[in-house]
Image (spheres, rainbow, N blue to C red):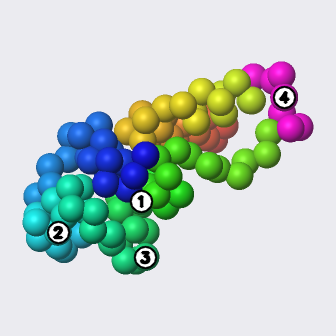
Amino acid sequence: MKFSATLKELREQNHVTQNELAEHLELTRSTIAGYETKGKQPDYERLLQIADYFHVSVDYLLKGSQQDTISVSRLSNTPESELLSAYMELSAESRQQLLDYVEFLQLKDTSRQTG
């Protein structure tokens, strides 16, 4: 998948308008439209900002697939490997929701241990 299609898909999945993304990146809406329809490419710094905004890797933005270098060989056939595999298949929005929930559980466990 090309960068233009990946960017548009991420925007739509996360219910973000071109205007909202442009404001966050301090660009014009037409620049975002150019990225999505005219084959224009952002510079490296913008790519990092876009990846950070959508909680994805630059690799994902450029290739349309997550190519994380996490080694799971020592985790094979464990609940941890199943969890990691499921995480990798989630959308950026769902990944963030899962991370938020994990943080909530960690706070809950910490309060139990100190209370």
Task: Please identify the quarter of the rendering in which residue 50 is found.
Answer: bottom left
Q: Is residue 111 above or below residue 31?
A: above
Q: Secondary structure at mark 4?
A: loop
Residue placed under numbered mark 1 in the picture: 51
Residue placed under numbered mark 4 in the picture: 76
Please report whichever mark, 3 or 1, sits nearer to the chain's N-terminal start: 3
Question: Residue 65's spot in the image, x, y percent?
Answer: 52, 44
Q: Is residue 51 left or right of residue 7?
A: right
Q: Is residue 53 above or below residue 66?
A: below
Residue placed under numbered mark 3 in the picture: 44
Q: Which mark is residue 31?
A: 2
Q: How far apart are labels 3 and 2 at the CA level? A: 15 Å
Q: How far apart are labels 3 and 1 at the CA level? A: 11 Å
Tell me if mark 3 has few (under 14), some (14-19) or many (20+) residues whose alpha carbon lies within 10 angstroms of its own.
few
Residue type at numbered disc 3 = Tyr
| Disc 2 to disc 1: CB gap under 8 Å | no
Residue type at numbered disc 2 = Thr
Magenta-drawn stretch contains 75? yes
Please report whichever mark, 4 or 3, sits nearer to the chain's N-terminal start: 3
